[in-house]
Image (tube, coloured by chain):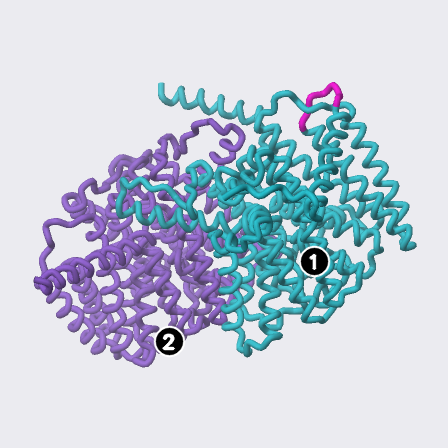
Amino acid sequence: MTPKPPKRATLPGYAQRLTGWILSRSALLLRRLSKGRVESATGVTVGAVWVLIAPLFFVCGVIDWLDGGPDAVALLISGLVIQLVGFFILRFSKFPSTLPLARLFTAFVSGALAALIAATIAHFATGVAPTIDVALAEASATVTGTNATTIEPETVSLGMMLFRSLGQWLAAAAMIVVLVRILPHLGVGGLDADGGVATRSARRLAPRSSSTMVRLLTLYMGLTILLAIAYFSAGMPFVDSVIHSLTTISSGGFSSHSGSIGAFDSPAIEWVAIVGMITAGTSLPLMFRALRRGDLHRFVRSIEFRTYIGLIITAVVAVLAWSDKWPTADNLRETFFWVTSAISTTGYVAGNLSLASYGSEALLLVLMVIGGMSASVAGGFKVMRFMVLGRYIGRELRRSIHPSAVEKIHLGKSSIGEVALARIIGELFLATMVILAMVLLFTADGLNFEAAFSFAISALSNVGFAFGLGGPNEHLQALGAVGHLSGALLMLIGRVSITPILVSLGGIGEPLQREVRRWRLTRHEKAVR
Amino acid sequence: MRVAGAGLLAVAFAMIVSAAVAVIDGGGAAAGLTAAALITASVGCALFFGSQVSSSTDSALAFASVAWSWLAVSLAGALPFLLTGVVSWAHFDDAIFESVSGFTCTGSTILSDFDSVPQGLLFYRSMTQWLGGMGLVVLAVAVLPALGIGGLDLIASEAPGPTADRLSLRVRDTARRLWLLYGAVTCIVAMLLFLVGMSVFDAVTHAFTTIATGGYSPRAESIAHFDSVAIELVIIAGMLYAGANFSVHWHALSQGIGAYRRVSEIRWYLTLIAGAFGLLLWVNNGELELFRNLRESLFYAVSLGSNTGFGSSNYVLWMPAAHLTLLVLMLVGGMSGSTAGGMKVLRLQVIFRYSFRELMRARHPNAVIPIRLGRTTIEEQIASKVVGFVLLYLGLIVAGGVVLSGLGVDPVTAFSGSVSALGNVGPALGEAGPTSNFLVFPRAGRLVLMAMMALGRLELFPAMLMLVASLRGLNRIQRQREGTKSP
């Protein structure tokens, strides 16, 4: 097959160039700014995040001013402060010449924290959140793309509304950057090249990771615009369709109505949302390759995509079978909506689930845990990792019959290394422990058992809705300060995954750890003697 | 086959003993029990004497035979419930449920009206657990580790106990010692219970189910029926003992208490229970008065920590945070090499170390860090076996929970029931609490639970092996048949 000549004159081509230009400009800006004296990757990251996030404040502030909303001044001023502080930090730090892995972890986590702090400032300064813990929880929901909120969206000004949805959208875009640029170095099992089939193909999209990034981001933007048009033509007002397309494609889930998608009460809009959510849960590199070549067969060939769609269909059938209602078009749509909302970890709701049975609740929770495909912007543990775990169990079963068999784990055509496997498994166990601890905190803060458990799972997977209370989205409201803080932490853990957080925490405690180990070693030597 | 025959004979013996109890009590169950005993005994004899142990047994086949005989025993064990008319024939699956729950030392019951059940049958019920425990002790201490099931060969690494290196040679010897210990402890517990004020009948039945970590009680309210601190203390001690490794117990007896100190699993086991006790105390602080709180928290920490499942009150009324603690206890269960079920403390240790090693490796990607248990280092192969086991275990719990809630049980009851059944605990949370029974699950759901109990008891992998081995056997037969046909 001869390589196709690059198409420059098309719309996607221009879009790609535009994205590339923006990216290279901002990278250049950052590089020029960060010529300080202190060698600190963390400083550079925090500064960069703040410098880059400030325009978001300005844009939303100006829009709010045009709209005559009350939050314009607060947004502009806090944006300015963040901008200045960001510049200041950047001015005094520079990127270190050598970067140990542990520092990279710390930088990654502190970048996420910096975004969290900025969003918290916005929520607090505009008075959208009355107390600091609520502001933290709201900010965390924004940054991680979770639809958990205490706020009635109708009471929020347009600027702030836009801030929240754009925040979710930008955070997911940042996630794409992280996915391509940083995760391969971190080796957070299964999301990166070592563990993944999907991201390895992401790497092969283009020889240089920056051009891969540009392509994926262009695709992401294109999908957002397409979805906005689709929402609009399905009958949504213009502003709403923009906001919803931003939060659908980023699998965030914030809505401008307290009834979420259900508030429009329109089958067409719900179908658009369903398609959008499925797209959000699909691997971006896979989509890029399939769409560029016009080769839809690639979807069918991807084993993860098959499993993903298979899971959705199985879940829909099961939910319909467990409810004692006929599968009419309405019921089918509702089921599809909830299932895709759970598995893509978007967290839209459409009224109360009228087909709810105990079985469907349990199933939706399981889907939340599974989450979208790897290399997508969805949260959750990712379909592929579960496929790998399934293979692992199978191998151990076979090994118990043939104890000395040596077997590699294959997924599709590629085999998966033992190191990546161990990382995935470690991640799963740690996440389980975190969930248990958080459930304890939630129950101590007054939630009932079912609500606490489902909300913990939902928050860790960045979904948002949960069960066990009156409505699907009342959990954050029902919690106190402890619950808000632990909820915020849980969402953050879900987004950046547990290993980086614990490792960067360990960076603080490392000298201590060394002492402990030395002490244990001497004790052991004594015992041996 | 021969193993199955032996098992059936043992059960028949249990039935006869129970019939004797029934005669003494004067209840109407004697005839039914005797009839069941006769049927079982005849089938058992036929199997026992009609087959011979083949000289060449590979490990999978050996285990398959044990597993199948377990099933045979459970089926036969259901007969008395049917023949005495306690469970009607139309609900024969309930009888099997009760029997499986007995022989797997689970203690989930479907009996609701305990007063109408004849004493002989209640005695028999306890005895099923005791016999189940007896089989288990040998299984857990000698057979499973020798086969290296789910990484249980680890036991040998720390406690060089009476593990059988060669299955056929040493197992008999090991079994004899273990049974001696098991019987002696049962006698001691029974005597103590009698001394602190139970009737002979209650003392014996409770001793049976305590040492087997089963949890059947002939009283509907379980231990709460007696409402006595002394009885609770004796039972707590019994459960604590039974939830620990029997081979370590044997060593402690022969070499002194120091044997306990060498085993890190014991430390974890006790720490876990103590931690749960502390947590329960804290959570229940505002709810119960201090003494009551101390008593109930300790009782439940031990009862669920050893996967026995006796009840001294209704914990369903406790705070949700307490439920979580109890659920984690059920999940983890007792020590390996004991009659307790669950995931086992040993495996918890391994996965803890495993996950924290991954953290270290994320930081230092090229570091070679061994996984340690106490002072011994674990091989990678074994660690991955353990991990595979735990993954499968968690997966089955989730699958069971989803299926049960799909059958119309509320999620809390469904998932805790699934944890409880797979861990062979007995009571669950939600509607299936310690004062309730498992009739709250629909009929199909009870079948699922039954399958999970059997799977959990046979440590998952062997159960899979059992199917594989028998499939292989069937294949071989078919191949032979085809071989004879084709020429």
Label 1 is placed on what type of residue? Leu
Residue B115: which numbered mark, if any?
Answer: 2
Drawn side of residue A357 relative to residue A217, left or right:
left
Drawn side of residue A278 relative to residue B450, left or right:
right
What is the tally of numbered marks visible in this picture?
2
Image quadrant where one finds the N terminus of chain B: bottom left
Return the x and y of residue B112 as percentages of the image width and height. Answer: 41, 74
Label 2 is placed on what type of residue? Asp
Per the image, is A40 magenta?
A: yes
As displayed, is residue A442 above or below residue A230? above
Chain B pictured colour: purple
Q: Tell me what residue is drawn at x 10 percent, y 50 percent.
A: B55
- The answer to whether residue B288 is visible is no
Chain coloured cyan: A
* Mark 1, residue position: A227
Return the x and y of residue B415 as percentages of the image width and height. Answer: 48, 61
Per the image, is B123 magenta?
A: no
Q: Quadrant of residue A280?
A: bottom right
Density class for disc 2 (Cα within 10 Å; few <14, some 14-19, many ≥20) is: few
- SS state under label 1: helix
